[in-house]
Image (spheres, rainbow, N blue to C red):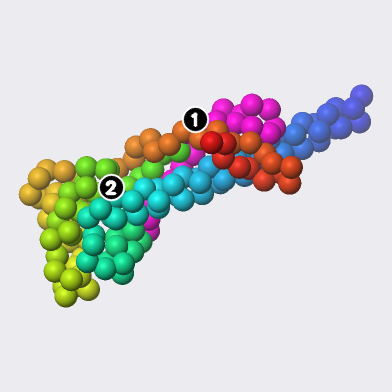
Amino acid sequence: MKTILQTLTVLSLAFLVSCTSNEKAFKNAAEEAAKTRFSATVEEEARGYLTQSDHFKNAYVSYMVKYAEFSAEEVKMNGESSGVTTVFITSYPPDVRKKLLSVASTVKSSSTGQFNFSNAVQLIAKETGLPGEPMKYPFVTLNLKKDAKGDWIVLK
């Protein structure tokens, strides 16, 4: 009887570890996909405003991505090979980004090297009452599935 209990305990622990490991890989894949999507989003936003130079546009995108944090929450696994999650982002909300882009678009090409996005956000916050610090909010809900190699991929 003791051997049976020990075997069942070991099997239960192995199952729990595999589920935890699988969910962790799922969350990591979702967070990476959200980061890629966020980077594309802020690049698209910048394209319409920051026409001074590609370097200035890239500096904005880098700034936004650098200070963004992602967390996959509300995970609903559908067995071992698929699931759904909402990825939350801690970043400047869209209205702050739009105002920042509006301000940055007025900078002369010769002055873009001296522009400080962080200082600009603080000034915008003082002037408009918009948040001057990153906020946590839901960014995207993703469906993921394991491919033939066992990697998590985002379903379209």
Q: Position of residue 27 (x, y in %)?
A: 55, 41
Magenta span includes 50: no
Task: Give me the residue at 49% from left, 39% from top.
Answer: 72
Q: List the residue tagged with mark 2.
A: 92
What residue lies at 21% left-to-right and 47% top-to-bottom? 98
Q: Is residue 141 placed above or below 39 in the rendered structure?
A: above
Q: Residue at x 28, y 55 (%)?
A: 46
How many numbered marks, from 0 up? 2
Image position, residue 12 (x, y; %) = 77, 31
- Drawn side of residue 76 relative to residue 55, left or right: right
Q: CA distance from mark 1 to mark 2?
A: 22 Å
Is disc 2 placed on a helix, strand or loop?
loop
Q: Quadrant of residue 90?
A: top left
Q: Is residue 113 left or right of residue 10?
A: left
Residue stretch in magenta: 65-86
Picture residue at 34% right of the left edge, 58% below the top: 61
Q: Earlier in the sequence, mark 1 or mark 2?
A: 1
Few, some or many residues within 10 Å of mark 2 (<14, 14–19, 20+): many
What residue does disc 1 label? 74
Mark 1 vs mark 2, foreground winner is: 2
Q: Amino acid at mark 2?
A: Tyr
Front-most of residues 99 and 66: 99
Residue 32 visible to the viewer: yes
The dot on residue 15 is: none
Q: Residues within 10 Å of mark 1 (few under 14, many from 20)?
A: few
Residue that protrudes farthest toward the top in the picture: 1
Where is 115 relative to 77, above or below?
Answer: below
Q: Amino acid at mark 1?
A: Glu
| Residue at the extreme left | 127
Q: Does dot 1 land on a helix, a strand or a loop?
A: strand
